[in-house]
Image (cartoon, rainbow, N blue to C red):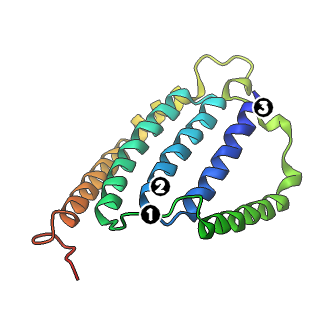
Amino acid sequence: MTYLMCLLLIGLVLGLVAVASNPSPYFAALGLVVVAGLGCGVLVGHGGCFLSLVLFLIYLGGMLVVFAYSAALAAEPYPESLGSRPIAGSMVIYSLGVVLVSSVFWGGWYEGSWLCVEELGEFCAVRGDVAGVAMMYSLGGGMLVISAWVLLLTLFVVLELTRGLSRGTLRAV
């Protein structure tokens, strides 16, 4: 399990480096979906199955809006991919930055921190993420309603921006 978690975390960091160094919105949106999947795999490894499912579904809905927005604004017929020299150079620079920052915090990690939520208590009656879901719906109901309204407003803003050249906010210059 430790090897799988290390693989997921390394993939997560490399995916974030690829997203940060990619100027093309097409590949960046695809990279964000892959990073979201790897992050949800990390959550599943720590015992948050339901939380990772909800997060992945909500994140995919948000990424659909972002991808539609970026596809509408991108006007390049041949976008740069990860294989081009400038992007590969920025990936190397970002990776070196991640290695330097992680070397500062390297001494505090040990393998005892790879525990699942259920392994922390002796008699665990429910899963850890189920209690979090109950807390989210009981005390966080107002925040869920506000979040739904913000996502709906974001959808309308994106649709208004990309409505067309004659009536939308973006016009040909």
Q: Do the residues labelled 1 and 2 touch (CB within 8 Å)?
A: yes
Residue annotated with mark 1: 79
Residue annotated with mark 3: 2
Quarter of the figure with residue 156? bottom left
- Relative to 133, is 75 above or below? below
Near-viewer residue (114 or 169): 169
Image spot of residue 23 (x, y percent): 49, 66
- Could you tell me which residue is drawn at 63 percent across and 28 percent down? 47
Near-viewer residue (96 or 131): 96
Identify residue type, mark 3. Thr
- Relative to 105, is 134 above or below? above
Query: Which label's residue is closer to the chain start, 3 or 1?
Result: 3
Q: How far apart are marks 1 and 2 (CA)?
A: 9 Å
Q: Which class describes the residues within 10 Å of circle 1: few (<14), some (14-19), or many (20+)?
A: few
Q: Which class describes the residues within 10 Å of circle 3: few (<14), some (14-19), or many (20+)?
A: few
Q: Which mark is residue 27?
A: 2
Near-viewer residue (89 or 135): 89
